[in-house]
Amino acid sequence: MKYQELLKDYHKKKPEIKKRLKEFKETFSQPDEVVFQELTFCILTANASAQMGINSVNALKDILLEGSEDDIRKGLKGRHRFWKIRAQYIFHTREYLKENFDFKIKEKIYSLKDRNLLRDFFASNKGIKGLGYKEASHFLRNIGFKGYAIIDKHILNCLHEFQQINDPQRPKNKKQYIEIENIIRSFSENVGIDMDEMDLLLWSRKTGKILK
């Protein structure tokens, strides 16, 4: 598979990709409550579709900030395949952020100057439930932070097809995640497409959509 085909696809989708990245960046100018909605979305998309995450967040909007765990569970029931455990994750994370940071999520993000420590805060923090490196990267990308790869099955399959990796197996730990992220970074540089744009481009080749 030649890079020319990929570049042709990129130029066709470039306006929509850039529009989506601009929307991500604008999210971080919104109040902390909106940023938490995005965090909730990423908790809900792990091992689920992006559309399921979108539908589930929309169902929770009125109860997300003050609702009990049971309220959240009822809001997710029938909409999310893992409605019980995800309700627990969302409630636990919200209460952790309220108790430890007065729900000033953006202020906490600003305080973490190192980009790797910033991702680690969301990926490895026991107070934040339901996020590994993929979804922590997903969250940070969706609020406008650049240079993080969202390594899901669609991205891995594309990398395998373009002979960038030998096996499209999901990374099992942080070390493997960073290794594949570096491969994506090098691949993007070689092709001449911004890494954040490459992520959306590859994902769209498998799903037919440029979502979040």
Image: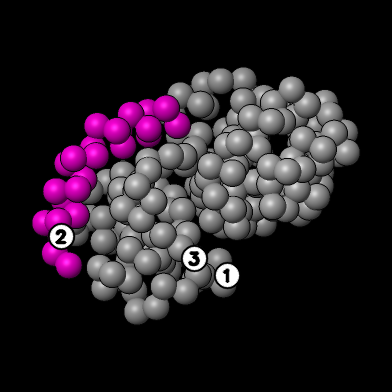
Q: Residue at x 39, y 51 (%)?
A: 207
Per the image, label 2 sits on a secondary structure element best described as helix
Indicate the amino acid at tag 2: Tyr
Query: In the rendered image, is residue 111 in sight?
Result: no
Mark closer to the chain start, 2 or 1: 2
Q: Residue at x 33, y 29 (%)?
A: 19
Magenta range is 1-24
Q: Position of residue 157 (x, y in %)?
A: 37, 66
Pointer 3: what residue? 177
Pointer 1: what residue? 173
Magenta part, dominant SS: helix
Indicate the amino acid at tag 3: Tyr
Q: Quarter holding the N terminus?
A: bottom left
Q: Is residue 193 above or below residue 21?
A: below
Q: Is residue 172 magenta?
A: no
Per the image, label 3 sits on a secondary structure element best described as helix
The tally of labels here is: 3
Indicate the amino acid at tag 1: Asn
Q: Is residue 111 above or below residue 6?
A: above
- Colouring scheme, one of rainbow, by chain, secondary structure, one colour: one colour
Tell which of 94 and 124 is nearer to you.
Answer: 94
Can you tell which mark lies on residue 3?
2
Per the image, label 1 sits on a secondary structure element best described as loop
Mark closer to the chain start, 2 or 3: 2
- Residue 55 found in image quarter: top right
| Cβ atoms at labels 2 and 3 below 8 Å apart | no
Q: Position of residue 194 (x, y in %)?
A: 27, 46
Left or right for 208, reference 73: left
Question: Mark 2 and mark 3: span between their CA atoms?
Answer: 24 Å
